[in-house]
């Protein structure tokens, strides 16, 4: 099977498995796991924040950040197609008791003036705005990069209103590798960030949440409340260290494969698709001659796995397990399937 469902399907390579096997362990709830401590220090340095903390998943990272930043009854500004709004099973409403304020972005980007417009005035009728969430790269917009200048503008608006900014940077390393902008430059426009070790970077599990030391101290309590205090988590952290040390540069291969796929798709009839919409490792297309379900099934029958993203859109996500040859094969399979549409 050529698995283009997600970059979450990536498997740890031999170096990672060896690091996991050899990891010296301790109880992280006592702060005694050497690999967790090393990973957290490494991650904080990489994103230019005072402190960082390992969490089991990107979802928990985002939710712990919201719980730490916000009081119940406040409002959180987020993009209407963001992972936090769309894919986290309303966790922020359930756990943090916040009211989401979804704003329609432009290809995942929230313009600063729209954000400023949505910030609540001080009025007894209104929920106070407590947080602004951004996503970079933006998953449902097709792995789009939130440009640095736009992030700066949002951050300036946030500062003006005394509000924190949380970045869902599940794929911030993709944004950095593809744009040449350092991760630190992106994260300088944020108060806190969550990024995933378990997507294109190939670790089996784990995400990092980073921010000011005081914020991370409080986040640690929230992680514990949610049952995310992991004991000998060095098993996970050892893989995370390899991910940050050795796997960042290889994201360029995923981007090149996505571009190859996109160029192939641009030649085909039966789909609506714009080559300029592909920034990183995600390609989202709209079939015109058949339903997305039908296209997904036809591809699966021929050995290509994809994911339905919207009622009329299907997603291909390049990842470490998929080679250039696999992409060439996918293009010819698509040609065959779409020719019959
Ligand atoms: N995204 C997954 C699915 O949940 C949709 C995928 O296959 O793309 N932020 C962003 C931007 C994400 O794309 C994801 C996962 C997460 C957060 C959550 O990470 P996990 O799965 O570790 O909870």
Image (cartoon, helix red, strand yellow):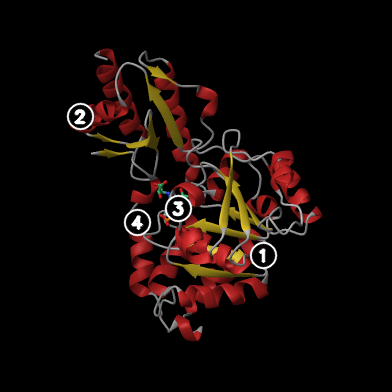
- Residue 218, how many percent across, how many down? 60, 76
Q: Which mark is residue 13?
A: 4
User: CA gap, disc 3 to disc 2?
Assistant: 28 Å
- The residue that disc 1 covers is 49
How much space separates mark 1 and mark 2, taking CA atoms?
Answer: 46 Å
Regarding residue 245, the answer to whether it shows in the image is: no
Whichever of callouts 1 and 2 sits on the residue coming sooner in the sequence is 1
Q: Which residue is mark 3?
A: 201
The residue carrying mark 2 is: 302
Q: Are marks 4 and 2 in contact (CB under 8 Å)?
A: no
Q: Earlier in the sequence, mark 1 or mark 3?
A: 1
Q: Any atom of ligand 1 within 8 Å of the CB at mark 2?
A: no
Residue beneath the point at 54% across and 76% down: 220
Quadrant placement of the C terminus: top left
Q: Earlier in the sequence, mark 3 or mark 4?
A: 4
Left or right of 38? Residue 295 is left
**Residue positioned most to the left:** 301
Q: Which residue is painted at 57% across and 72% down in the image?
A: 219
Q: Secondary structure at mark 2?
A: loop
* Badge 1: residue crowd in 10 Å (few <14, some 14–19, many ≥20): many
Tell me the residue at 57%/64% (across/down): 65
Mark 1 and 4 residues: CB-CB less than 8 Å, in contact? no
List x then y, in percent, for residue 193: 60, 58
In the foreground, 24 or 269: 269
Circle 1 SS class: loop
- Which of pointers 4 and 2 lies earlier in the amino acid sequence? 4
């Amino acid at each position: 099977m050529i698995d283009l469902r997600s970059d979450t399907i990536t498997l740890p390579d031999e170096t990672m498995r060896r690091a996991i096997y050899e990891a010296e362990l301790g109880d992280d709830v006592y702060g005694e796991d050497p690999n967790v401590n090393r990973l957290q220090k490494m991650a904080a340095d990489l994103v230019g924040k005072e402190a960082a903390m390992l969490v089991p998943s990107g979802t928990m990272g985002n939710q712990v950040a919201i719980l730490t930043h916000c009081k119940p009854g406040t409002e959180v500004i987020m993009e209407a197609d963001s992972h936090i709004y769309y894919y986290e099973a309303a966790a922020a409403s359930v756990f943090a008791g916040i009211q989401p304020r979804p704003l329609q972005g432009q290809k995942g980007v929230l313009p600063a003036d729209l954000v400023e417009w949505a910030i609540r005035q001080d009025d007894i009728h209104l929920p106070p705005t407590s947080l602004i969430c951004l996503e970079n790269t933006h998953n449902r917009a097709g792995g789009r990069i939130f440009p640095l200048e736009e992030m700066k503008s949002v951050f300036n608006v946030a500062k003006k209103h005394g509000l924190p900014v949380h970045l869902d940077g599940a794929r911030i390393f993709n944004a950095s590798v593809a744009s040449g902008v350092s991760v630190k430059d992106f994260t300088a426009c944020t108060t806190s960030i969550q990024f995933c070790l378990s997507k294109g970077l190939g670790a089996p599990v784990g995400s990092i949440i980073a921010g000011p030391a005081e914020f991370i101290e409080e986040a640690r309590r929230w992680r514990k409340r949610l049952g995310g205090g992991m004991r000998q988590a060095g098993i996970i952290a050892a893989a995370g260290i390899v991910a940050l040390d050795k796997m960042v540069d290889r994201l360029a291969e995923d981007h090149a494969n996505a571009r190859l796929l996109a160029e192939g798709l641009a030649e085909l009839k039966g789909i609506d698709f714009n080559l300029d919409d592909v920034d990183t490792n995600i390609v989202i297309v709209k079939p015109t001659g058949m339903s997305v379900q039908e296209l997904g099934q036809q591809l699966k029958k021929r050995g290509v796995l994809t994911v339905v993203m919207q009622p009329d859109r299907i997603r291909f996500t390049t990842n470490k397990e998929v080679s250039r040859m696999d992409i060439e094969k996918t293009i010819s399979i698509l040609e065959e399937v779409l020719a019959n549409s």
